[in-house]
């Protein structure tokens, strides 16, 4: 019989999954041994959230080859919808099924928004797509800051007018004050499971027929259309799945906070840029690299906090080193494709 050998892609996938499992086991053992203080322990869930967001955005930027700057918006949608579900059902459901359903609600609602936004947005390319997705993220954040939702008797009332909040018996979403009192259900184990499932789903998609079609669109859209690949369909698939994963990460994030507020620091433009930095520094198209970059760049400022402002200097040096180490042809092609100065040079020529 002919001996079967694993392909390079399969080995890379197993290596990525093994890395996540080993990191989880190492952190769990260190926590049980008392080697992780309370400050670092509080970063474990955010690490899972940021790593999951990096995997989500890498699907659009690295695999599909489109620049999206609105992923913080999908995270915001998932966070608020999941927190809303938990608040409404807190008294009638047990912790585990409620949290499980809240994560599903966050992912599904974010996926619906991703699908609806993708219908007009994915007709655009390059910088135009980035601008529209950026606008979407800002619109979502601003809507959450003027949205008032509360209970009136046995019904739930929605309003964009702050005066309407006076008539509500119980506030759930209180405009700029957001949602307070969300059940604190998020744990490192749940974050690990969400990250692991996200990675498995993305890696299986990449190595499937649909994944190869998505990458063909990334490499050459005209050639992909010429061989019969339905470009819009596969772009919608990648964009919607990415939004679902971002929504699940947002649901985990919401259940790790005492008060969920749609501030620029949490769901604004800078947060979307931070996720893009994770993807670029980890290597465009590399799921494992995106996770590593998210973990390192989140931990470094906190671990080096004892040296004051010098920690940002070290942070910048580490970013440069990561960029040099993970520089690959995909990263170069992505940056050149979205470099406005390069485009102007071509137009002049």
Image: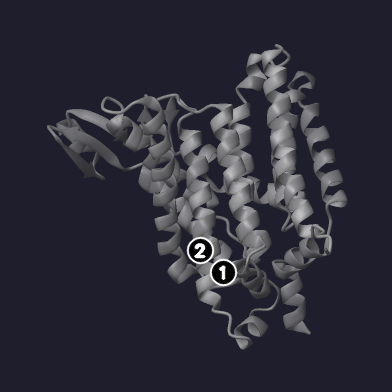
Please state which of residues 194 and 2 is positioned toward the viewer in this rendering.
2
Examine the rendering and report whether any part of residue 307 can be seen: yes
- Counting from the top left corner in percent of width and height, residue 5 is at 82, 59
Pointer 1 with pointer 2, Cβ within 8 A: yes
Residue sitting at x 63%, y 73% = 213
Residue furthest bottom as drawn: 226
- Counting from the top left corner in percent of width and height, residue 328 is at 83, 60
Tell me: 64 left or right of 169.
Answer: right
Q: Quadrant of residue 300?
A: top right
Examine the rendering and report whether any part of residue 297 can be seen: no
- Which residue is denoted by mark 1 in the rendering? 128
Q: Is residue 145 above or below residue 184?
A: below
| Crowding near the residue tagged with mark 1, few <14, some 14–19, many ≥20 C-alpha atoms within 10 Å | some
- Counting from the top left corner in percent of width and height, residue 207 is at 67, 62
- Counting from the top left corner in percent of width and height, residue 152 is at 14, 34
| Label 1 SS | helix
Residue sitting at x 38%, y 39% = 101
Quarter of the figure that contains the N terminus:
bottom right
Tell me: 182 left or right of 28.
Answer: left
Residue sitting at x 50%, y 54% = 243
Residue furthest left as drawn: 153
| Label 2 SS | helix
Q: Is residue 93 above or below residue 145?
A: above
Q: Is residue 342 above or below residue 157?
A: below
Query: What is the C-alpha distance between the residues marked 1 and 2?
Result: 6 Å
Please state which of residues 273 and 245 is positioned toward the viewer in this rendering.
245
Residue furthest top as drawn: 34
Residue sitting at x 30%, y 28% = 93
Tell me: 246 left or right of 208.
Answer: left
- Which residue is denoted by mark 2 in the rendering? 132
Please state which of residues 146 and 280 is positioned toward the viewer in this rendering.
280
Tell me: 253 left or right of 12.
Answer: left
């Amino acid at each position: 019989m002919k001996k079967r050998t694993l392909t390079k892609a399969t080995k890379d996938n197993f290596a990525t999954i093994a890395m996540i499992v080993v990191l989880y086991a190492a952190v769990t053992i260190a926590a049980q041994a008392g080697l992780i203080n309370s400050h670092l322990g509080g970063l474990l869930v955010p690490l899972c959230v940021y790593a999951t967001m990096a995997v989500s955005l890498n699907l659009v930027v690295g695999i599909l080859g489109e620049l999206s700057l609105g992923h913080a918006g999908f995270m915001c949608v998932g966070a608020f919808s999941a927190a809303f579900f938990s608040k409404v059902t807190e008294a009638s459901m047990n912790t585990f099924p409620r949290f499980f359903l809240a994560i599903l609600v966050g992912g599904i609602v974010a996926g619906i928004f991703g699908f609806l936004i993708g219908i007009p947005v994915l007709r655009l390319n390059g910088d135009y797509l980035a601008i529209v997705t950026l606008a979407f993220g800002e619109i979502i954040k601003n809507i959450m800051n003027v949205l008032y939702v509360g209970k009136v008797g046995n019904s739930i009332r929605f309003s964009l007018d702050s005066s309407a909040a006076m008539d509500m018996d119980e506030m759930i979403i209180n405009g700029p004050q957001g949602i307070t009192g969300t059940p604190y259900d998020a744990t490192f184990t749940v974050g690990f499971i969400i990250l692991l499932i996200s990675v498995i789903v993305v890696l299986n998609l990449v190595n499937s027929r649909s994944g190869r079609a998505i990458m063909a669109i990334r490499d050459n859209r005209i050639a992909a259309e010429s061989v019969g690949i339905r470009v819009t369909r596969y772009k919608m698939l990648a964009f919607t799945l990415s939004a679902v994963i971002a929504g699940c990460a947002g649901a985990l994030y919401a259940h790790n906070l005492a008060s969920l507020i749609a501030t620029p620091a949490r769901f604004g433009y800078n947060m979307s840029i931070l996720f893009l930095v994770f993807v670029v520094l980890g290597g465009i198209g590399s799921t494992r690299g995106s996770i590593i970059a998210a973990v390192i760049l989140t931990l470094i400022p906190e671990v080096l906090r004892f040296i004051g402002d010098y920690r940002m200097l070290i942070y910048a040096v580490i970013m440069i080193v990561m960029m040099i180490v993970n520089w690959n042809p995909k990263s170069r092609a992505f940056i050149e494709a979205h470099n406005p100065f390069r485009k102007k040079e071509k137009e002049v020529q």
